[in-house]
Image (cartoon, rainbow, N blue to C red):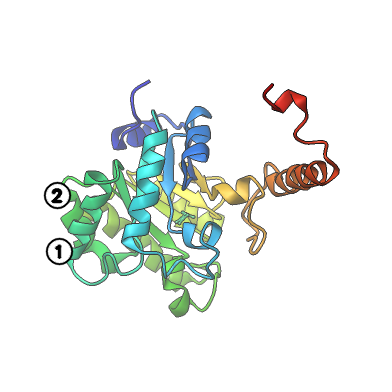
Amino acid sequence: MPKITANAFLQKKAEHQKITMITAYDYPFAMIADEAGIDAILVGDSLAMVVQGLDTTLPVTMDEMIYHTKIVSRAVKNAMVIGDMPFLSYQISVEDTVRNGGRFLKEAGASAVKIEGGAEVKKQIKALVEADIPVIAHIGLMPQAIHRMGGYKVQGKTQDAAERLIEDAQILVEAGAFAIVLEAIPLDLARRITDELVIPTIGIGAGPHCDGQVLVMHDVLGLYERFAPKFIKRYANLKEQALKAIQTYKEEVEKGIFPSTEQSFQ
Ligand code: KIV
């Protein structure tokens, strides 16, 4: 099967087929997501929280993002790998944006980048696209703007805020983004944006009418308990299974059950 490209995203929208995306940060889970047939794997800056144990996504660095993206790319055969541009990798200048965005493709094997922001990142997105770096935009709740937004809150709830998001989405299309992540916005607003745009919307906490959905792997698998927004769905409880397995291993070592002759050499 050929690698999923930006064109495949557009084709899926045209054919009313849902786009599937999940985050991954390491080799085994990226391989599992790819084997499951997921369209796109986002190496999200959420790794700051679910992998590094930090309180926000702000501290994760470009070098750390490149490190994880390289590992994920190594595991993936078919899915599109997307590198998430971390805080301050694109806010300072257009030159920085292209240099940092380019690193995801040149050093880490990604085929697209994601960038948070509306009209304020129009020039950065334009510059990335002009440098042949495909871009997914991200509006609504933007975790990198947590201090301005005052918490992880649903966005676009007033008429004014909703209109601003619709305008932002149109500006991002004009700038050249090939898809837009809509995070934590009311489902009717997400439907309106999805219907109005020629490019696909990928929802997270944005209801069922988006062209695709994305979730954080650790939420899907039940590996992260510190924060569970209403919009996540746990499809497994790996934390519990891992805990039981490690407790059993510990007990067996303490009781002299492991290793037995089966795991020993004569
Ligand atoms: O960093 C991330 O994982 C994300 C997704 C939740 C969209 O931005």
Lower position in the chain sequence, tag 1 or tag 2: 1
Q: Residue at x 33, y 52 (%)?
A: 66
Q: Nearer the viewer, residue 184 or 72?
A: 72
**Residue 90 appears in which quarter of the rendering?**
bottom left
Q: Which dot marks residue 133? A: none
Secondary structure at badge 1 equals helix
Q: Which residue is mark 1?
A: 95
Say if disc 1 is inside 8 Å of ligand 1.
no
How packed mark 1 is, by other alpha carbons closer than 10 Å (few <14, some 14-19, many 20 or more), is few
- Locate residue 262, reporting x and y percent: 74, 23
Residue at mark 2: C-beta within 8 A of ligand 1: no
Badge 2: how crowded within 10 Å, few (<14), some, or many (20+)?
few
x, y percentage for residue 149?
Answer: 47, 76
Residue at 28%, 65% (x, y): give it: 89
- Kind of residue at disc 2: Ala
Tell me if residue 64 can be seen. Answer: yes
Residue that mark 2 sits on: 131
In the depicted structure, whether residue 39 falls above or below residue 50? above
Drawn side of residue 4 relative to residue 53, left or right: left
